[in-house]
């Protein structure tokens, strides 16, 4: 199998950390699908080549894809999935402040406000494939916390408070 094309919105090239069961790891090895390719292999192909159920392949692929974004690790990728976002297209339509409120309600306790910055960072990346590298870091979005801003076209430096 040749390596699938990466999405231009992807930032990281490292292999994602996925919640794979031992038999799924074996199936991936047999199909010669590398972990870093799981994000860009269509879930239908992923399922056909490995025998892993399609719904599970959709989840694993989405988790890998979310982890390709700057500032998004395995835990936050799982949180994005748990909030109901299944693809970059879903995430591009999201409001980061609403994501944060939904996440806080989901966990049932106060959550570090930096999580909102990471949501904002992720949404901005999927909306703008040409987002400057510095805007792919969660701390870039700190001045926008609590606002409706999820992308700053043509601006690489956030306003000072």
Image (tube, rainbow, N blue to C red):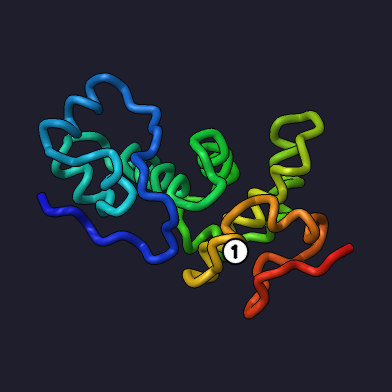
Q: Residue furthest right?
A: 161
Task: Characterize the local packing of mark 1: few (<14), some (14-19) or many (20 or more) Cα atoms within 10 angstroms.
Answer: many
Along the horizontal axis of the image, is 33 left or right of 135?
A: left
Q: Nearer the viewer, residue 154 or 35?
A: 154
Along the horizontal axis of the image, is 139 left or right of 40?
A: right
Q: Nearer the viewer, residue 137 or 84?
A: 137
Task: Report the residue at 65% width, 51% height from top.
Answer: 138
Task: Report the residue at 75% width, 67% height from top.
Answer: 158
* In the image, residue 24 above or below residue 127: above
Task: Report the residue at 44% width, 63% height from top.
Answer: 9
Q: Nearer the viewer, residue 88 or 137?
A: 137
- Element carrying mark 1: helix
Q: Which residue is mark 1?
A: 124
Q: Position of residue 161 (x, y in %)?
A: 89, 63
Number of numbered discs visible in the structure rendering: 1
Q: Quadrant of residue 29?
A: top left
Q: Position of residue 85 (x, y in %)?
A: 53, 51
Q: Nearer the viewer, residue 94 or 32?
A: 32
Q: Residue furthest top?
A: 22
Q: Position of residue 16 (x, y in %)?
A: 38, 39
Along the horizontal axis of the image, is 127 left or right of 1?
A: right
Along the horizontal axis of the image, is 44 left or right of 86?
A: left
* In the image, residue 45 above or below residue 158: above
Task: Report the residue at 54% width, 45% height from top.
Answer: 72
Q: Position of residue 120 (x, y in %)?
A: 66, 56
Q: Quadrant of residue 59?
A: top left
């Amino acid at each position: 199998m040749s390596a699938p094309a990466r999405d231009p919105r992807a930032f990281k090239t490292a292999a994602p950390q996925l919640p794979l069961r031992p038999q799924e790891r074996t199936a991936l090895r047999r199909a010669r699908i590398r972990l870093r390719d799981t994000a860009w292999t269509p879930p239908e192909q992923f399922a056909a080549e490995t025998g892993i159920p399609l719904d599970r392949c959709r989840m694993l692929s989405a988790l890998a894809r979310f982890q390709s974004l700057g500032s998004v690790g395995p835990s936050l990728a799982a949180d994005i999935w748990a909030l109901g976002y299944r693809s970059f297209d879903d995430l591009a339509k999201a409001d980061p402040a609403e994501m944060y409120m939904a996440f806080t309600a989901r966990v049932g306790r106060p959550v570090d406000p930096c999580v909102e910055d990471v949501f904002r960072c992720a949404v901005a990346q999927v909306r703008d494939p040409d987002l400057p590298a510095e805007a792919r870091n969660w701390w870039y979005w700190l001045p926008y916390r609590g606002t409706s801003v999820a992308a700053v076209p043509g601006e690489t430096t956030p306003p000072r408070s």
